[in-house]
């Protein structure tokens, strides 16, 4: 397999090369690139590799900027020290998201996943089909790591959340009448990353779990008002265009 490394830390490049030599000696490294500019130029001058190992923080900015300039049609394995970009990574053709320091077991698992996906795709359109497979796979979040005071990261399980809401541009996850957490995500991002069987976007302001619902009122103009077990101080009205979808979701059909 022919691959390239996009990484601006020399120590990380050496470590990844050593790991690849250990767990996948068949991988041939075509190039080592350390910036957005260099990566865009490389893709403009060379055939598409069979895989890319990509760090997110590069010498001249975020690696996601590369996708604004070139169309990468091969699988990508992200290698980074930051977990907050995982959702964005899986919106492009990412196979896996490995957190540094990377060990041989994690790398081997990612390469096994890549090999498995490649076997599923027809030989003549292998990577195009692989991209579609990856983009259609749904990965739902079960936990969040939320920035706390100082250098702390606070864990939050999705199972603990009754509802998410936005007010004054700030998104909060509400766990109880006295406990909530500020999240560094938009409601749109949350709606995409959470299991739709568990959470429903009732309107622009609220994303609620089924278990948080106490009862439902019939409202004006054939709409519904949802009452939660944790009072919110305001009516949560289901958008009229989403009423039928909400009823289907709530009944579990």
Image: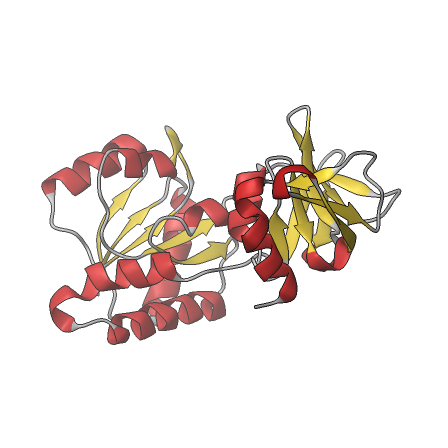
- Quarter of image, res 121: bottom left
Q: Is 48 left or right of 109, judged from the image as shown?
A: left
Relative to 15, is 38 above or below? above
Most distant residue in the right direction: 178
Quarter containing the N terminus: bottom left
Between 130 and 231, the one nearer to me in the picture: 231
Look at the image and name its color scheme: secondary structure
Residue 88 image-quadrant placement = top left
Residue 125 is situated, as x and y percent measured from the top left of the image, at 15, 65
Q: Nearer the viewer, residue 165 or 80?
A: 165
Residue at the spot x=79%, y=48% of the render? Answer: 228
> Where in the figure is residue 20, as x and y percent of width and height?
34, 64
**How many labels were placed on the picture?**
0
Position in image of residue 234 (x %, y %)? 79, 34
Toward the top, the furthest residue is 168
Q: Is residue 178 left or right of residue 205?
A: right
Quadrant assignment, res 118: bottom left
- Left or right? Give the position of 138 relative to 232: left
Residue 154 visible at all: no
| Residue occupying image coordinates x 53% and y 51% | 193
Residue 201 at x, y = what percent?
59, 46
Up-down relation of residue 105 to residue 28 (above or below)? below
């Amino acid at each position: 397999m022919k691959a390239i490394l996009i990484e601006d830390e020399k120590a990380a490049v050496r470590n990844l090369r050593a790991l690849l030599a250990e767990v996948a000696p068949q991988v041939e490294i075509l190039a080592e690139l350390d910036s957005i500019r260099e990566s865009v130029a490389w893709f403009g001058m060379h055939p598409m590799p069979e895989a890319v190992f990509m760090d997110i923080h590069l010498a001249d900015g975020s690696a996601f900027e590369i996708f604004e300039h070139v169309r990468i049609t091969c699988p990508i394995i992200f290698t980074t020290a930051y977990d907050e970009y995982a959702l964005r990574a899986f919106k492009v053709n990412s196979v896996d998201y490995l957190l540094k320091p990377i060990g041989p077991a994690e790398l081997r698992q990612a390469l096994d996943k890549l090999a498995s996906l490649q076997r599923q795709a027809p030989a003549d359109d292998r990577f195009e089909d692989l991209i579609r497979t990856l983009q259609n796979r749904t990965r739902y979040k079960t936990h969040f790591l939320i920035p706390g005071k100082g250098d702390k990261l606070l864990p939050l399980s999705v199972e603990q959340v009754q509802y998410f809401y936005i007010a004054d541009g700030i998104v909060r996850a509400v766990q109880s009448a006295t406990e909530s957490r500020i999240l560094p995500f938009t409601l749109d991002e949350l709606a995409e990353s959470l299991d739709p069987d568990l959470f429903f976007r009732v309107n622009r302001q609220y994303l609620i779990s089924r278990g948080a619902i106490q009862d439902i009122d019939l409202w004006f103009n054939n709409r519904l008002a949802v009452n939660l077990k944790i009072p919110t101080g305001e009516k949560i009205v289901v958008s009229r265009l989403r009423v039928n979808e909400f009823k289907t979701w709530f009944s579990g059909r």
